[in-house]
Image (tube, rainbow, N blue to C red):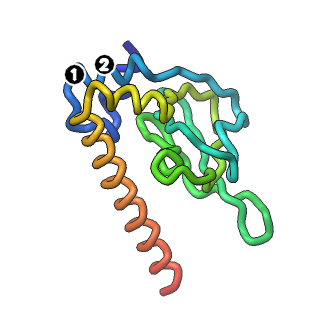
Amino acid sequence: MEKLAVISSSPLFEMLSSTELAHLAELSEQRRYAVGEFVFEEGERGDSLYVIIRGEVEVLRRDGEGQPRILTVLTAPDFFGEMSLIDKEYRSATVRARSEAVLLRLSAQHLAAFRQTNRDGFTFVVINIARILSARVREANARLTARQA
């Protein structure tokens, strides 16, 4: 039930039917992370996205001197890790539990299984990822412009 509640509240799954949401909840895997534990590290091959059920995670990236810098802190029902699913590239950042965290993991295999029986729902997920990534890029551009001013 908790998985379904989190998936239902995530903007990533907007416009999905209750049946589609239930199917995604069933496919997802719940994972627990202790404070300081890495979900994944920059440069690793990625094949999953994560939705936060409880707790906080921090997104870090190494600066020009190799020092980790916190880019943002995420809480429920935020999600992360979607970029590697789309472009099949290495992780662009590290994600570490800032507090005890409970996450839902949806792998490329889970999403492929979802696509097989829910083509329209899968299309909505892809559109939502694109919409949210676009908003994140606009935010980053605004921050860069503000720093340069």
Furthest residue to the front? Answer: 116
Image coordinates for residue 106, horizontal then vertical, percent = 47, 30
Q: Residue furthest top?
A: 1
Relative vertical location of residue 62 with respect to residue 107 in this rendering, above or below: below
Q: Quadrant of residue 102 in the image?
A: top right
Q: Amino acid at mark 2?
A: Ala
Residue underneath mark 1: 18
- Residue 46, position in %: x, y? 60, 43
Foreground residue among 73 and 123: 123
- Left or right, 100 with reference to 131: right
Q: Position of residue 126 (x, y in %)?
A: 32, 45
Horizontal side of residue 65 vs 26, given as left or right: right
Residue lying at 62% horizontally and 51% vertically, measured from the top left: 91
Residue found 53% across the figure and 28% down from its top:
103
Q: Which mark is residue 119?
A: none
Residue type highlighted by circle 1: Ser
Identify the residue at horizontal 55%, vertical 48% (top origin). Answer: 73
Between 81 and 119, the residue placed more toward the observer is 119
Residue picked out by circle 2: 22
Q: Nearer the viewer, residue 86 or 18?
A: 86
Disc 2 crowd rating (10 Å Cα; few below 14, some 14-19, many 20+) is: some
The answer to whether marks 2 and 1 mark residues whose Cβ atoms lie closer than 8 Å is yes
From the viewer's perspective, tell me whether residue 55 is left or right of residue 86: right
Q: Nearer the viewer, residue 80 or 73?
A: 80
Give the SS element for disc 2. Answer: helix
Task: Tell me if residue 109 comes above or below residue 18 in the rendering.
Answer: below
Task: Name the image quarter holding the N terminus.
Answer: top left
The residue tagged with tag 1: helix, strand or loop?
helix
